[in-house]
Image (cartoon, rainbow, N blue to C red):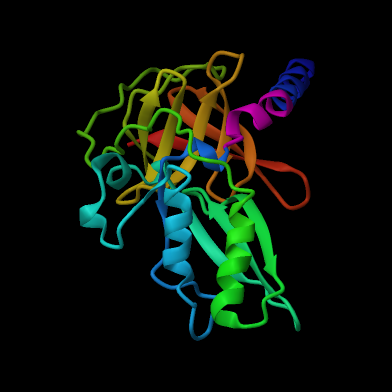
Amino acid sequence: MIKKIKMKKTLVIIMAVYSAAVFGQKVSDYKYVSIPQKFETFKGDTFGLEAFLAKGLAAKNYTVLPAHIDQWPAEAKDNSCNIVNAEVINDKSLFTNKVIVQFKDCNKKVIFESKGRSDIKEFETGYPDALKDALLKVASSNPVEMLPAVQKKVSDQVASVSEPVAQSTSVAPTAGNFSNGKTDVQKIQIDASQFILAKSGSSVPFAVFKNSSKKDVFIVKLADGNSTVGYFENGSIVIDIPQSDGRYTKEVFTGK
């Protein structure tokens, strides 16, 4: 019992130390930007803000992706986490044209937003002027190394069958496909320090695992943006899922 408590405390400390460093990401880390064809918060005319945003980001060395995915470069098409999604939100007040430029990662988590305003009353010139003000706070692109393509097909692998053991042991899983009985996922190794669990047919990770300082214990970022811990146990992948009451439930993904 004491050993389990110490283990839990160790995991909590690991998560606290590494969360910010592991998951922190800046807009300038990206090369590719996706801009929607129309900004949703503008009910009617968007006053050419889509083109204005594309021009402003291109001037900061970002590559703005075309509307059709089949025209995207391979490193953007094959892994959505190489793309940051930009949006302009109408933040207008009674006498001032105001906008918010918002950037989201592949998990739909806001990683940066910048507000801009203009005292020009006319919408046609006031909104672009407000957007120009907001873009002043956006750093120029200084991209990090691209993530590799997400594997869409994984060859079937048979998990080795072992005799039951009395105690849980840290054994790395050998299977590529896993299930918790409700959700089927596949394990995709990104590099030596991280892997993802992706739902079948989706390029958006269900969970991202990054190495901690303890062998076979990982810092996990879930699709909803929450951070927790995960680990290997008897060839399965285990995630401690945070609950609203502050407790954690054990979610076990076994090889298929």
For residue 229, side relative to residue 12 (left or right): left
Residue at the image point whose x is 67% and y is 31% from the top: 20
Q: Is residue 34 above or below residue 39?
A: above
Extreme-bottom residue of the structure: 44
Q: Nearest the camera: 15 or 53? A: 53
Tell me residue 119's x, y (percent).
72, 73
- In the image, which residues are magenta? 15-25
Instruction: Residue at 34% x, 42% y: name it.
Output: 79
Task: Report whether 182 appears left or right of 19.
Answer: left
Does the rendering let one see residue 252? no
Percent across and percent down for residue 2 are 79, 17
Q: Residue at x 45, y 73 (%)?
A: 48
Residue 128 visible in the snapshot = yes
Queried whether the magenta region covers residue 61, the answer comes back as: no
Q: Which of 12/3 is in front? A: 12
Residue 82 locus on image (x, y percent): 40, 41
Residue 143 picture quarter: top left
Q: Position of residue 254 (x, y in %)?
A: 42, 35
Asked if 162 appears above or below 78 in the picture, the reply is above
Where's the N terminus, which quadrant? top right
Q: Main secondary structure of the magenta part?
A: helix
Residue placed at 58% from the left, 60% from the top? 132
Quadrant where the C terminus is found in the figure = top left
**How many marks can you see?**
0
Position of 171 relative to 140 (above/below): above
In the rendered image, residue 16 lying in the magenta stretch gets the answer yes
